[in-house]
Image (cartoon, rainbow, N blue to C red):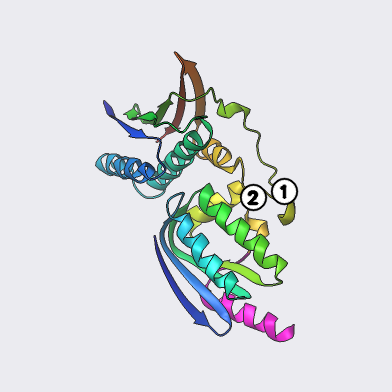
Amino acid sequence: MEYTECFSIMNNYERIIEANARLENFCKKYGLQGNLGSIFSIVLDEILNNIMTYSYNDSKEHIIDIKFIIEDDIFTLIFCDDGQPFDPGTVPVPALDEPIDERKAGGLGIHIVRKLMDEVDHRREEGKNYFIVKKRL
Amino acid sequence: MEIKKKNVGNTAVIELTGRLDSNTSRELDQELAELFDKNQKDILIDLSRLEYISSAGLRVLLVGLKKINKKKGRLALCSMNEFVKEIFDIAGFTPLFNIYSSQNEAVETISEETNLA
């Protein structure tokens, strides 16, 4: 069986709340609660923030398409934006053992996504970025 | 997220309930800024009712810790659940903070250290 949900939001940080509410409902409907639900909420927060912060070099409104899929015990989240090419694979792993004064929070979001999910992929197709993350349930 | 504040001795205690993410981390940032403005030296953040934390929340804690270190104060954490602890470990944040298992233990240790200083 495959369960999916697709929707779109504008590139406004406030809209992350709405996206997260839809994710929560989706997870609840299919019994993904507790830590799993929290993992997906964190991943959604990190990826949407990343897109909104780094993908656009203009101040225009943009649409981000989001898709949740549960198939064969794998949860997939797909984010599609029309911003500048951005490959999360190029984001370096932050230095995690630096002393406090040297520590920076930059790059932590993608690092957390990589650690929480089983697969993190990026595709650039027809002028759009597709950020695809998967986790076995 | 809900934020409750109280003072125990000289320690300002902030209790967080819910999620500390990109949306709610600004609220914590403001609370910390107010305490810094009041020159509060010892701050304890109780995470017992925190469901999860994202990098936006971690960033606020890191910035807060750096600021209070410069003022020779303390920003400690207590009562984090296993999942929040896992995020701290992933981010390499666990060694940066004084993390106590309970609010009582934290407050007692902080006040003992203050008395010794």
Quick one: B116 or B73, which is closer to the camera?
A: B73
Classify residue A59 as left or right of residue A112.
left
Answer with the quarter of the image where residue A132 lies: top left
Do marks 2 and 1 share a subunit?
A: no
> Residue at label 2?
B92
Classify residue B39 as left or right of residue A70.
right
Q: Is residue B59 visible?
A: yes
Element on which disc 2 rests: loop
Q: Residues within 10 Å of mark 1 (few under 14, many from 20)?
A: few
Q: Amino acid at mark 2?
A: Gly
CA–CA distance between discs 2 and 1? 7 Å
> Which region is colored magenta?
B98-117
Residue contact between numbered discs 2 and 1, judged by CB atoms under 8 Å: yes
Answer with the quarter of the image where residue A75 lies: top left
| Most common SS among magenta residues | helix
Q: Residues within 10 Å of mark 2 (few under 14, many from 20)?
A: some
Q: Amino acid at mark 1?
A: Asp
> Residue at label 1?
A97
Placement of the N terminus of chain B among the 4 image quadrants: bottom left
Q: Is residue B78 visible?
A: no
Q: Tell me where residue A81 appears, x and y as whole percent.
A: 43, 26
Classify residue A122 as left or right of residue B76.
left
Placement of the C terminus of chain B among the 4 image quadrants: bottom right
Q: Tell me where residue B105 appears, x and y as whole percent.
A: 57, 77
Residue visible at 48% across and 41% down in the picture: A46
Q: Tell me where residue B80 appears, x and y as whole percent.
A: 51, 62
Q: Chain of mark 2?
A: B
